[in-house]
Image (cartoon, coloured by chain):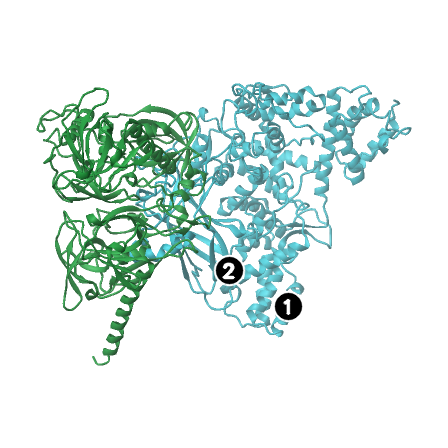
């Protein structure tokens, strides 16, 4: 093999042309990759020979172009899989291979970031579903359910972030959705016709249990109909349902009062029964709540729910996990009392009348509405008022509405276009209000509404104008449009003033709307959407249910909210002596003394084995599959989300871990993973990844503490958990606590990674090498205040980076 | 009998046999029988006939077998039996009273020296009976009964035939204990008649074939003032005795395989139940079924809950599998216990798995578990909700916000509301003979059965709900239709005047302002009651010389779960008295009692029953045609009256 320095230099030149970080990268290339290629690859891939049509000595260092990036990806895959160099050739040292693999992976990651960050004169960043819903609510005062099956599709994400402009695509089908949504929300905000009458729909047990319907007459005649109640018992399918799926015919769209009278029998040391009203046709939970009320002292619960006109399929459920075994309850025995059940029915209480399982006893369900608490609606008053109902008023309405909807001043020509639409509709015979609604629907489908538009086609800009800054800020911290105060400051051109901006950040973080940030950012940063993505096996984890899953996610988001609200240090994310729990999650963790559904701050003791984000059930569970924890995935997640280090993809065709022989002793997953370190092609990466995950071996797939690993295959006792390990830099840890101490030692690195995640979320784009210096400055500045979260946000918002396009 | 105080044993005619039998009982279950009745017996928690007179009578309670010495003993004969509800009418020979009895779930029945069901016991034979008081204190709970064959065979006694005087209607025999080679008592007469059946080696022989020296076991007819009745059955020789016992055991095994081994729950926890199986003292039947082969320890058996009548619901589907963890011994010093106690781990805990809860256990290969509950058609409560008749329903008291005849004793009775027809099951049902009808036709007087109380009643203007089985053998399930009515006679609307005085009726009563049951929502004769429920009486035996018919109560055939025509199990058996006044109708004609034949299907009307008198049949309608004609005639009569009333209305 003959070295080809000229070619390498040529490649390096190409690299300079495409990559701003050329100097450092080139140096690494020269030092690491060039000798490796020369030693191991060019024999078959140079000017003389191009096996597989691949020539490496002239391969451009272009990681953005599709063709060349494909070559580099192929090289990466071949090296990681051990396919190359071929077996007959001498093998490179694993350390050398790992270095090359890491270099290529880094270049590819950088290139991907660069692609996402490519800036046009005008950038369009679509609103997410959350933002659309919030913005509609602020504009019109009505709630649009974008998350039901009838609503918007799921937002695509990039490493968990759902608001990356280059990822959020727009297909023709979306237009139909947005048009339909616009008409729906306008009809509700500006309802045609007179005030809809408030109606009461009453469901009694006879109506909810199909087999009982025919008996209603008998019970009424006997004067005993009021004694009939409806037990809802958790079944083998995790939840109990009231019986048949119930049809609810809603006459008018609006807010309804959902009223449920029921008892909830709560066994000691077990979960309480949980009422859930589920709308099956749109896969949406309308209401749910734990119920703890004795048989003879039922309670009446009330919920405000938003319902659209038409038929709805409703399940009334007891949403606690059921037993593994089927139930014997029957449709044919009418329930009047726990003391009057048939002997062949499932036993519900013990001989001391204490409940054996959590179950509900339902008296009735009522739907009352629509609740027209003011008429005309606030939107009607604001939009139509007492005007003249002519083109002039239409112009005025559109000007006001479009200015708010587009989050910036609207050109007179554009207002005229919408006004002409109103006039055309009126000419075609439409009344004033419907004609205006047509124009308003058009505004709600306009790019200026659906997208956050930054820049101008007229001239290239690098910084945001005041309106753009207001929008970026409000969608960052509130996930909705700027309020009047922000618009006013933008209109006055004062928002770029640092003191004003700092003041606005403080005002916005103190506003209840900041809860949207406290929910959305940790969910996206930590990829919490993956929690429950692979539903835990019901047989292995019978207690896992929707409520637990929600509580797990709520712990993490409320934890973040608490850090934000109290302006605590980022260190709390790495370790803390407190967390946020409700009764359900506390029961899951085995922590006593927590009651109620609301998340509350709870002090932790060492024996609780919790503290910080990394030992929260949501974080521990999101990397699990349906049956077991996955240490490698945990390590990869931690590397990406906490350390900000991307992990190269695994090689193709990695064989699955073999199941143990029945007669063989039970083997821990950790021991099975040891194979990674024996295989040189695996070891290079897994030596870095696996310890990060193995540190959390004391937590099972749904985040419960354990000291031994339950292993199904093999014989003998379950293996004891070993959570020790060694980081790639040689630092060792004995268990998860020691690991967290090492992480705390690296708080600076974590803060840098966190700042990058924060910026990605706020600026709706991937950070690139060109952003690094500013990110480092922001993190470093915030260190002076011990990396307090609100302070960091203030520093970030007032930085040049935040205001950059 | 109902409401009568507890009595002491009364033995006006203590024959050597009766004395021997009594001594055997005492020897078996009450070794201290010789003790004074007034002496407190430390082993007896409550008063019985022979001990502990100073304490209150023992009342059976759920989950507890009555201890020995707590019973009142008597002899008697069965006049009527309801297999489904485990009830009947017993004539107490001691007092002559008719006892409307019921049997607790653990009650033991023995026939031919083997465990038996009520359905195995012939009517009219002399029986030994143990009684316990019901909730009202009346001794109506039969906890143990057996025939004379059993009484003697169980202690190895037989009659030694000393001589035969068949022409004079008697055999001369003396009591003997085989193996002891001695005559235990002097010769005595055993009456025989033309109906006496003699069995030997599996065949029926004639009285004339008996030879001196034969070892006999007998069941005799009811006692009369003249003494014991004639022998109904005679079994000749030890082999025949054993064959009879073996045959009954086989029948009982079949019955238990069909219905499951009964028992109750002694205790339970979250996952286990401990149960004790019931048995008569002939434990061999239960033991022969409860074998290692049928119920191996460690394997699953099948458990279905039952109601208080030991009737399963839908045993094929509503039971659960349960692992038999171990077998323990249960106390035997009480009535009803098999001595077999099981510790089970059900795969699901049921409401009935509480102390005192009743259940039956099955091997998975037994009939009920092999398919839908067809084998118990007419008896089980579920049967995929194929209702045959309200006669076999088990109404649920908890569905009613008032007291009923079958529960809710703590609640007040239904209170009448003006113009509102009372709902079904709200009534208090009283049977009695119509003795007077008021001139206005809106009320009258009846004499209550047993008590003889005369009740002046009024008909409610709003009437009562009439439930009729809309039976159709080609369309199941059977439906029940409802209408409002007031007086029914011969299955048609009627006035009080249509019903002949002296007819026994069923009065659905409600309380008046003084809380006395005088207000009648609905009343009907026996004919109507049978017709409404599609229950028929089939003649099983004619004993016209004694003025009696033996009948079987049964339901008609019906489509079963498989859409096949099935014959429900018989409901019961009864003795009906007839006399020269009894009118018999067949087709359009009146016929004589002598024209009746075994197998005839009857509807009947009766006279009232008193404390000692079971009443008599006033009318018998033989066959469907006669029954339809009777109903049609009453309907015409009623229609004519309605038309006349309508015609007369404008004049008013």
User: Among the chains, which one is cyan?
Assistant: A
Image coordinates for residue B366, horizontal then vertical, percent: 42, 35
Q: Say above or below: A403 vs B51.
A: below
Quarter-wise, where is residue B489 in the image? bottom left
Q: Chain of mark 2?
A: A
* In this view, the mark in front (1 or 2): 2
Name the disc covering residue A310, or none: 2
Residue A633's tag is none
Quarter in which the N terminus of chain A is drawn: top right
Badge 1 crowding class, 10 Å Cα cut-off, few under 14, some 14 to 19, many 20 or more, is: some
Q: Give the structural element (helix, strand or loop) at label 1.
A: helix
Cβ atoms at labels 1 and 2 below 8 Å apart: no
Residue A308 seen in the figure: no
Residue drawn at (51%, 57%) of the image: A142
Return the residue found at the far bottom: B651
Alpha carbon separation for disc pair 1 and 2: 30 Å
Give above or below for B139 relative to B452. Answer: above
Q: Give x and y (percent) for residue A769.
A: 70, 36
Is A2 positioned to the left or the right of A33 in the image?
right
Which comes before the other along the chain, label 1 or label 2? 2
The reply to whether residue A454 is visible in this rendering is yes
Closer-to-camera residue (A762/A611): A611
Q: Which chain is green?
A: B
Give the residue number, with chain letter if any, for mark 1. Answer: A421
Q: Is residue B410 left or right of residue A173?
A: left
A466 shown above or below A443 = above
The answer for which chain carries disc 1 is: A
| Residue visible at 63% across and 19% down in the picture | A730
Front residue of B488 and B20: B20
Direction from residue B35 to residue B498 in the image, left or right: right
Residue located at (9% from left, 31% from top):
B54
Q: Quadrant of residue B371?
A: top left
């Amino acid at each position: 093999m003959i070295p080809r320095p000229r070619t390498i230099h040529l490649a390096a030149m190409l690299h300079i042309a495409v990559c701003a970080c050329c100097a450092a990268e080139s140096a690494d290339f020269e030092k690491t990759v060039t000798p490796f290629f020369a030693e191991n690859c060019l024999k078959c891939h140079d000017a003389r020979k191009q096996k597989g049509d691949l020539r490496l000595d002239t391969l451009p260092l272009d990681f953005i172009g599709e063709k060349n990036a494909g070559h580099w990806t192929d090289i990466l895959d071949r090296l990681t899989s051990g396919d190359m160099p071929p077996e007959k050739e001498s093998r490179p040292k694993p350390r050398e291979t790992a270095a090359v693999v890491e270099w290529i992976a880094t270049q590819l990651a950088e290139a991907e970031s660069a692609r996402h960050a490519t800036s046009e004169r005008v950038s369009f960043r679509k609103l997410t579903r959350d933002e659309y819903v919030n913005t509609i609510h602020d504009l019109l005062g009505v709630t649009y359910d974008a998350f039901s099956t009838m609503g918007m599709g799921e937002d695509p994400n990039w490493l968990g972030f759902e608001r990356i402009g280059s990822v959020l695509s727009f297909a023709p089908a979306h237009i139909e959705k947005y048009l339909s949504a616009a008409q729906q929300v306008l009809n509700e905000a500006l309802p045609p016709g007179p005030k809809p009458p408030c109606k009461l729909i009453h469901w009694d047990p006879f109506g909810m249990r199909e087999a009982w319907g025919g008996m209603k007459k008998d019970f009424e005649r006997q004067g005993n109909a009021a004694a009939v109640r409806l037990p809802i018992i958790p079944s083998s399918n995790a939840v109990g349902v009231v019986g048949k799926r119930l049809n609810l015919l809603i006459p008018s769209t609006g807010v309804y009062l959902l009223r449920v009278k029921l008892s909830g029998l709560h066994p000691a040391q077990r979960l309480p029964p949980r009422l859930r009203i589920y709308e099956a046709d749109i896969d949406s939970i309308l209401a749910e709540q734990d119920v703890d009320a004795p048989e003879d002292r039922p309670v009446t619960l009330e919920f405000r729910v938003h319902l659209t006109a038409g038929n709805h399929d409703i399940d009334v459920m007891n949403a606690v996990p059921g037993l593994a075994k089927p139930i014997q309850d029957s449709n044919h025995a009418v329930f009047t009392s726990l003391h009057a059940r048939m002997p062949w029915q499932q036993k519900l209480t013990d001989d001391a009348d204490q409940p054996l399982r959590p179950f509900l006893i339902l008296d009735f369900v009522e739907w009352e509405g629509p609740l027209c608490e003011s008429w005309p609606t606030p939107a009607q008053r604001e939009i139509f008022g007492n005007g003249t109902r002519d083109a002039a008023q239409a112009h005025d309405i559109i000007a006001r509405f479009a200015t708010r909807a587009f989050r910036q001043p609207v050109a007179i020509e554009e207002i005229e276009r919408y006004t002409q639409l109103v006039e055309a509709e009126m000419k075609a015979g439409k009344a004033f209000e419907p004609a205006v609604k047509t124009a308003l629907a058009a505004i709600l489908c306009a790019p200026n509404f659906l997208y956050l538009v930054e820049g101008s086609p007229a001239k290239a800009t690098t910084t945001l104008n005041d309106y753009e800054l207001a929008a970026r800020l409000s969608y960052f911290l509130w996930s909705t449009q700027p309020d009047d105060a922000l618009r006013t400051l933008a209109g006055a051109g004062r928002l770029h003033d640092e003191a004003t901006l700092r003041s606005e950040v403080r005002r916005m973080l103190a506003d209840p709307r900041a809860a949207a940030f406290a929910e959305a950012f940790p969910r996206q940063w930590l990829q919490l959407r993956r929690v429950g993505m692979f539903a835990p096996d019901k047989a292995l984890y019978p207690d896992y249910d929707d409520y637990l899953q929600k509580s797990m996610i709520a712990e993490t988001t409320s934890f973040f909210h608490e850090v934000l609200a109290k302006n605590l240090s980022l260190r709390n994310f790495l370790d803390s002596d407190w967390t946020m729990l409700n009764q359900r999650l506390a029961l899951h963790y085995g922590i006593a003394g927590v009651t109620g559904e609301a998340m509350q701050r709870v002090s932790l003791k060492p024996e609780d084995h919790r503290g910080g984000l990394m030992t929260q059930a949501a974080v521990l569970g999101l990397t699990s599959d349906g049956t077991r924890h996955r240490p490698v995935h945990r390590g990869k997640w931690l590397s990406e989300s906490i350390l900000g280090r991307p992990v190269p993809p695994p090689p193709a065709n990695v064989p699955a871990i073999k199941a143990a022989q029945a007669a063989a002793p039970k083997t821990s997953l950790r021991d099975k993973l040891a194979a990674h370190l024996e295989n040189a092609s695996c070891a290079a990466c897994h030596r870095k990844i696996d310890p990060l995950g193995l540190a959390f071996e004391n937590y099972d797939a749904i985040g419960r503490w354990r000291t031994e690993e339950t292993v199904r295959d093999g014989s003998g006792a379950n293996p004891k958990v070993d959570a020790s390990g060694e980081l790639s830099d040689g630092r060792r840890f004995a268990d998860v606590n020691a690991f967290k101490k090492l992480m705390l030692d690296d708080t600076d690195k974590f803060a840098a990674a966190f700042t990058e995640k924060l910026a990605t979320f706020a600026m709706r784009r991937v950070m690139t090498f060109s952003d690094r210096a500013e990110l480092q400055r922001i993190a470093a500045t915030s260190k002076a205040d011990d990396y307090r979260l609100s302070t960091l946000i203030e520093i970030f918002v007032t930085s040049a980076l935040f205001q950059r396009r | 009998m109902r409401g009568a105080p507890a009595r002491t044993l009364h033995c006006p005619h203590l024959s050597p046999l009766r004395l021997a039998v009594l001594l055997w009982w005492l020897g078996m279950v009450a070794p201290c029988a010789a003790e004074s009745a007034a002496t407190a017996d430390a082993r007896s928690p409550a008063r019985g006939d022979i001990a502990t007179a100073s304490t209150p009578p023992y009342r059976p309670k759920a989950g507890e077998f009555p201890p020995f010495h707590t019973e009142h003993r008597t002899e008697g004969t069965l006049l009527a039996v309801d297999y489904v509800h485990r009830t009947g009418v017993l004539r107490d020979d001691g007092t002559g009273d008719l006892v409307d009895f019921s049997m607790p779930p653990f009650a033991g029945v023995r026939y031919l020296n083997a465990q038996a069901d009520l359905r195995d016991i012939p009517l009219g034979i002399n029986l030994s009976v143990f009684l316990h008081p019901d909730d009202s204190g009346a001794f109506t709970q039969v906890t143990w009964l057996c025939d004379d064959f059993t009484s003697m065979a169980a202690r190895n006694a037989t009659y030694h035939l000393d001589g035969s005087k068949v022409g004079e209607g008697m055999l001369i025999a003396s009591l003997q204990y085989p193996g002891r080679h001695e005559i235990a008592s002097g010769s005595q007469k055993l009456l025989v008649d033309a109906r006496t059946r003699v069995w030997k080696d599996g065949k029926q022989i004639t009285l004339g074939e008996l030879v001196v020296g034969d070892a006999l076991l007998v069941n005799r007819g009811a006692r009369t003032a003249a003494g014991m009745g004639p022998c109904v059955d005679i079994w000749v020789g030890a082999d025949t005795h054993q064959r009879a016992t073996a045959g009954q055991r086989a029948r009982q095994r079949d019955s238990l395989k069909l219905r499951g081994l009964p028992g109750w729950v002694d205790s339970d926890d979250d996952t286990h139940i401990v149960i004790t199986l019931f048995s008569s003292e002939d434990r061999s039947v239960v033991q022969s079924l409860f074998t290692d082969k049928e119920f191996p320890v460690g394997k699953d058996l099948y458990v279905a809950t039952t109601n208080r009548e030991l009737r399963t619901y839908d045993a094929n589907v509503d039971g659960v599998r349960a692992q038999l963890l171990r077998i323990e011994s249960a106390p035997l010093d009480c009535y009803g216990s098999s001595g077999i106690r099981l510790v089970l781990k059900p795969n699901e805990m049921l409401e009935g798995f509480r102390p005192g809860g009743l259940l039956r256990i099955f091997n998975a290969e037994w009939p009920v578990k092999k398919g839908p509950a067809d084998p118990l058609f007419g008896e089980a409560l579920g049967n995929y909700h194929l209702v045959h008749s309200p006669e076999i329903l088990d109404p649920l008291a908890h569905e009613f916000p008032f007291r009923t005849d079958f529960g809710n004793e703590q609640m007040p009775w239904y209170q009448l509301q003006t113009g509102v027809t009372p709902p079904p099951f709200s009534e208090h049902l009283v049977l009695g003979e119509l003795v007077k009808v008021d001139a206005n036709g809106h009320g009258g007087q009846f004499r209550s059965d047993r008590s003889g109380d005369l009740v002046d009643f009024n008909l409610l203007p709003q009437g009562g709900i009439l439930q009729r089985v809309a039976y159709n053998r080609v369309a199941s399930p059977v439906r029940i239709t409802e209408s409002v009515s007031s007086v029914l006679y011969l299955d048609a609307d009627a006035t009080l005047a249509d019903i002949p005085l002296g007819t026994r009726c069923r009065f659905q009563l409600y309380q008046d302002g003084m809380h006395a049951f005088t207000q009648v929502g609905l009343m009907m004769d026996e004919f109507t009651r049978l017709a409404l429920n599609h229950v028929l009486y089939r003649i099983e035996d004619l004993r016209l010389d004694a003025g009696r018919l033996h009948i079987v109560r049964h339901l008609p055939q019906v489509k079963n779960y498989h859409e096949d025509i099935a014959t429900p199990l018989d409901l019961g058996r009864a003795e009906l008295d007839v006399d020269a006044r009894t009118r018999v109708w067949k087709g359009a004609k009146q016929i004589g009692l002598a024209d009746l034949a075994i197998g005839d299907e009857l509807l009947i009307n009766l006279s009232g029953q008193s404390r000692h008198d079971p009443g008599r049949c006033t009318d018998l309608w033989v066959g469907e045609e006669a029954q339809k004609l009777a109903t049609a005639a009453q309907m015409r009569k009623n229609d004519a009256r309605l038309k006349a009333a309508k015609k007369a209305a404008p004049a008013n």
